[in-house]
Image (cartoon, helix red, strand yellow):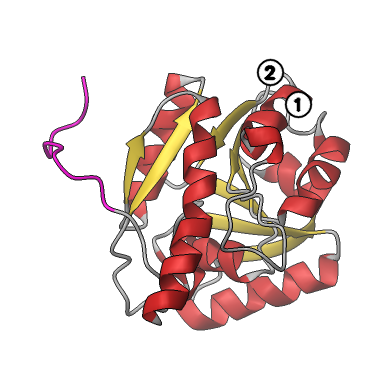
């Protein structure tokens, strides 16, 4: 079943890559941005690549209102500034937050805010009526944007609402990745920190986008 997904920050490389993969697999995608014209331009580029009209561009408030599920892929400095004006529109929805607290120029050094999770902080700010799920922190934008490339990594999914996490894991599976539930929203701190480790690994080994795999799991769904 197709899900309407709003990607806030879909004009960037990470959000654009996820939006491309979603549209390519038959989902309706709304590119959200503060700049509606940039959003429409990004949506046209996706449609041109897949040869179908699956993506549209809107300003953030309209994108959230029209979506079944909302994905946030903006830089850490813009995370809360983006979410606070959308609090009312997000009520009752699932928000998938891919935020990583990278603080340039030392992005290969772990710098969690007060040692805690940036996504867990978003859940605190927004309140319990908005189901926040952490995902996509460790997936290479370079690989997401290459439809000929199979993305060889797992996606850690953290959240306090089991049903919301299951829906996000199913969506991740639909675009060819494996989503793995990794605990409550506070555990997102580990996934967020892992991104800086992967950046350091990429630099050391001149890789275009290293990822992570969780071993020792059966192929069956968890009970």
Q: Sort mark 2 into few (<14), some (14-19) or many (20+) by Cα contacts within 10 Å.
A: few
Image coordinates of residue 198 in percent, x first then y, are 44, 62
| Residue that carries the numbered disc 1 in the rendered image | 126
Image coordinates of residue 214 in percent, x first then y, are 25, 45
Q: Is residue 39 above or below residue 92?
A: below
- Do residues under tags 2 and 1 come within 8 Å of each other at their CB atoms? yes
Taking the spot 70% from the left edge, 56% from the top edge, the residue there is 74
The label nearer to you, 2 versus 1, is 1
Q: Can residue 137 be seen in this view?
A: yes
Q: Disc 2 on helix, strand or loop?
A: loop
Residue 179 - label: none
**Left of 210 or right of it: where is 12?**
right
Residue 129 - label: 2
Q: Quadrant of the N terminus?
A: top left
Q: In which quarter of the image is the C terminus?
A: top left
**Left of 78 or right of it: where is 148?**
left
Q: In this view, does 110 lie above or below 46?
A: above
Image coordinates of residue 166 in percent, x first then y, are 39, 30
Q: Quadrant of residue 210?
A: bottom left
Q: Give the range drawn in magenta.
A: 213-223
Taking the spot 40% from the left edge, 42% from the top edge, the residue there is 156
Mark-to-mark CA distance, 2 and 1 = 8 Å
């Amino acid at each position: 079943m197709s899900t309407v997904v709003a990607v806030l920050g879909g004009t960037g490389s990470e959000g654009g890559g996820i939006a491309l993969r979603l549209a390519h697999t038959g989902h309706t995608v709304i590119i959200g941005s503060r700049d509606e014209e940039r959003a429409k331009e990004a949506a046209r580029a996706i449609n041109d690549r897949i040869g179908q009209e699956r993506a549209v561009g809107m300003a953030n408030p309209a994108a959230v209102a029209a979506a079944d599920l909302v994905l946030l892929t903006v830089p850490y400095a813009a995370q809360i500034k983006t979410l606070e004006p959308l609090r009312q529109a997000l009520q009752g929805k699932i928000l998938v937050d891919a935020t990583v607290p990278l603080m340039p120029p030392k992005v290969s050094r772990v710098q969690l805010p007060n040692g805690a999770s940036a996504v867990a902080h978003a859940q605190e700010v927004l309140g319990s009526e908005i189901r926040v799920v952490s995902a996509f922190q460790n997936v290479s934008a370079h690989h997401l944007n290459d439809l000929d490339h199979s993305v060889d990594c797992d996606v850690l999914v953290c959240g306090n609402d089991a049903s919301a996490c299951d829906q996000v894991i199913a969506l991740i599976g639909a675009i060819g990745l494996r989503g793995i539930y990794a605990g409550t929203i506070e555990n997102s701190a580990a996934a967020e920190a892992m991104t800086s480790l992967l950046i350091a690994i990429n630099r050391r080994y001149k890789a275009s986008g290293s990822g992570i795999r969780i071993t020792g799991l059966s192929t069956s769904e968890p009970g």
